Image (tube, rainbow, N blue to C red):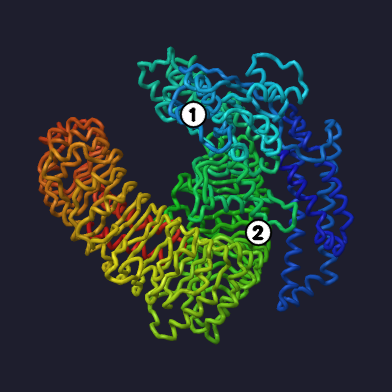
Amino acid sequence: MAEIVLYDTAGSIIRSLSSLALQEIGVLWGFKNELRKLGDTVSTIQAVLLDSEEKQAHNHAIKDWLRKLKDAMYDADDLLDDYSTQLLRRQLMTRDKKMAKQVRIFFSKSNQLVYGFKMGHRIKAVRARLDEIAIDRIKFGFNEHTTATQFEHVKRQDTHSFVHGEDVIGREDDKESIKKLLFDPNMNEKNVSIIPIVGIGGQGKTTLAQYVYNDEEVRRHFDLRMWACVSDPFDVKTIIVKLIESATKERPKSLEMDPLQSELRAKIDGKRYLLVLDDVWNENHGTWSNLEKLLVGGLRGSKVLITTRSEKIAEITGTISPYPLRGLSESSSWNLFKKMAFKNGEEPNNPKLVEIGREIIQKCAQVPLAIRSIGSLLYFKNSEDDWLYFKNHDLYKITQQENDIFPILKLSYDHLPSHLKQCFAFCSLFPKDYEIEMKVLIQLWIAQGFLHSSYGNRHLEDIGHEYFMDLLWRSFFQDVQRDIVGEIGKCKMHDLIHDLAQSVAGEECTILYPDREKVDGRTRHVAFHSSDSLPDIPALLPKPNKIRTLLLRIPILPGLDDVFNWNNSVLELNKPVFNTLISSFKCLRALNLSRSNIQKVPNSIGKLEHLRFLDLSRNEDIKLLPASITKLQNLQTLRLEFCRGLKELPEETGNLISLRHLGLEGCDSLTHMPHGLGKLITLQTLSLYILGKKKSFLSKPKGGLGELDGLDELRGDLLIKGLEHSRYSPSKAKAANLERKQHLQWLMLEWDPEPSDESDKAIANDEQLLQNLRPHLNLKLLSIAGYAGVRLSSWVSSLSNLTSIIISDCKWLQHIPPLDRFPFLERLFLTNLNELEYISNDGSDVSSSPLKFLALANLPKLRGWLKTRETDHLPLFPSFPSLSFLSIQNCPMMSLTTPSSPSPLSDLSKLKYLYLLELEQLEYLPLEWLQNLTSLETLGIFDCRKMRISISPLFQHLTSLENLTILRCKELTSNENEDGAHGLGPTRFGHLSIIGVPNLVSLPRELRDVTTLQGLQIMVCPSLVSLPEWISDLTSLQELEVVNCPKLISLPEGMRRLTSLHHLTIAECPCLEERCEQGTGEDWPKIAHVPNFRKGGDGNLKEWIASRIRQYLEEASTFPYGRFLRQSDLSKARILTIQLKLWHTWI
């Protein structure tokens, strides 16, 4: 990686030296000529770096030359960064009038001479080193290249169209899916459809294409089949020659372009053909179009099948969505491994060898080519010792030696443009299977100077997003998670891709573990991963003063950021250790101290002059930040998320003139914003802005809404809290100028509803205040909480780009804007609105509404959707053709079971999730409801105390039902005519949970025919006396939990025949627990075959039961809110309260 880093570092140095600001300071301090000479030397060296990349692989002297050069280049870059820091200080001093004295002292003649002499000496020393290294370049005979090549071309062996069907394992389903696409004649309006298959290298794209190409049905379906391995470069003439050869089995007579294209068109015109273009790398749309134009002459139903590693190529070429090829299943992976590693593909009799083999294939990450490669090697190793040695010692080396799988993955890297190579290699600092936050990764790239703009008006974040997407398109990232507005939040790297990143990063990036010995002195980027100890990190690094990145305490396992468990660390970064780190790592650009149990940040933090990225998030004991932190003029990102004890930001936070991202989500104790925050005009992230109480005469000045005026670069989400403090000066809200902030996507406005001011003046002032907070029309999510007005502002209806609206705790609100004003609205959540009677007053047409999620909670006066005459019979909800989630909680005035025409739920045929909570008025589920819910997959009924639920109509009409949870309902009834139950039931019904049904005596007979049931939970059913003998018919049952059913005294004989049952729990059933005592209980023989059995008395069982019940309740109360209301601490606490109120009843 050294040569790539060097090329970009040289470019960074040249750009810095050519900046007008640096030239001005060179004149001011008397070393302009030295700066020019330094630039000439760096330019001379940069010209040969690309050639050195090609030659260094086989020449150790060149490698050593590059290492020396890298050290010198980094020192030059650090030196120029010192100058840039001085410029920033000068800019800060001249900005603030109160610093005029410091400015005069700083720029006095004597001070300039001293500083200029010192810096001039340092420049000469660095230039002398580089001159000496530059002279050495001559003996290597490098050629000069002025521009970076896009990639180093490595020719891949040509593929062919044939494969034996028996050689393909685990791709039968994929083949059938591709065949369906091939056989569809009406895929699009064009005669020729293009189907891309996308996957990482070694995944089996070519094999799958071969498998389909040689299928007998495919042969008969198409008049003509052609195959061409495209690889790179993408040369249209070469491809045409290959296609003609494939179609005619003969070499074209002429290799001129015109006769070639005529011959190709003659072969395909009037035929329904199949063309496979294997291993496509070309991302130039124009080049692709030149080939596509020659392929349009086929009959309707002709298909072009493309294999590629790049989703970007798939988007350019495909006429339909790409087909993503995933890894093999666990069983298929083992079957393939057996075939390659064992004689005749038969599993050996040695169980230990099988165990080792299964552990080995975990390393292969379900990639067929990796499995084949390793299996082939092990075929010639017969003993357990050989296999164990391979697993423990050679398995890692196999990738390092680039045996089979690695060159294919490396090929993807070699094709990267140079600017992406170091960005990708940097990702090796994250642990495997880590959920990488896209925005944080881009911020780290910016901090290291990996990104630069050719155009002055482009944000580096936008360029970083392009870099990220480019790597994603090329399959270097996977498992993308998106937020509520569709933006990418997190991703992962495939394990083999991570191995590749570590390999290409080499000595540049290092992961430190507690037992690791000293690392290479040339390392610049370090990550420390541990959950229990903090070593003497400076002692492990020979040159800690050269380190640019230090990431401490990145969790090894994903998911540690769960909203209910913030502080997972047992590390403690005390003050002496902290001071040692700072004094040792003077060149740090990025420092991550998240979850380090820091109680106090020392003043020495201000000495890290080069620091661009500082992560102090999730240190809950930090109460204040030192004033010295505001001396970090280079700081671009300051992450303080979930520092719950943080009370205020430093008074001079406005001095952080380079700050672009200030993360404050979850800082619950913050009381106000500092005055002067509005000076940070480059700020793009400000997730939280708190308005403090009215200041007293002696208190420090606090930031008001006017501080937001100049922050027009804000993007992402913004939560403004404490608006009740501006209630009596609503005109000042205009100063925020939210309407100018065109990049904001989420806006959350919160008044504290307790204690509330119910006066007419408060209502009028809140309405004026909200009117003055009008945002830009680009807004996608709007949340309003605690507002005291009766109506929302008129501007709400003008936000036509909204996809989500959340309105909560608005006690006097009586009107909701017409939904037809929001053509993109997908989510609507209305909670705790005491005065709302109807959602619509004008009968607006929502028949084409894209609404997908609707949640109504704690609306005591809500009667229905549309206000109309009582004699009219209208549905409870209008027809939402796309609605897939509906949750109704504690709406006592809604007439849910009143006869109406049409049905109370109208047309909800797309509904997949339905949750009914705390609906005391609901006594049964009307048949009219059930008849409309043909797509319903999940039904949750919680705390509807009067409801009697009959299983028979549920199963009869809810044919798509997969999950049913019933919690605290009066009765669960069954069809008394057992014969009438046969043949009923959804075809995919998999899980049933019955909790707190006091009158349940036996399981509904309708379950007998549900052979797909995999999970059954029965909890807190005091009247249940027996489990039926027909339970043996539930042949797919894998998990059974019976908790707190004291009258249940024995198990049926049918339990013996539940051969799929893997998990059985019996707790708080005294008689049954005694009968199930291992080895001695009367019912033990019936369950002895179950591998995982736990019963009352086992350790921590009560907590486990609590977690199970909590899981069900969180599913209902959190699902509709959690992912986007988590931005709001008030809302988050409110939802958690709902959960605790429900589940604590049972514990």
For mark 1, what is the residue? Answer: 183
Front one among 544 and 1130:
1130
Depth check, front residue: 760 or 75: 760
Q: CA distance from mark 2 to mark 1?
A: 64 Å
Left or right, residue 311 beside residue 749: right
Location of residue 480 with respect to 91 vertically, above or below = above
The C terminus lies in quadrant? bottom left
Q: Is residue 115 above or below residue 187?
A: below
State whether residue 468 appears in this view: yes
The quadrant where residue 155 appears: top right
Instruction: Quickly name the residue at label 2.
Output: 608
The x and y percentages for residue 174 are 46, 29
Residue 409 rendering spot, x and y as whole percentages: 60, 31
Q: Is residue 701 above or below residue 20?
A: below
- Left or right of 819? Residue 240 is right
* Amino acid type, mark 2: Leu
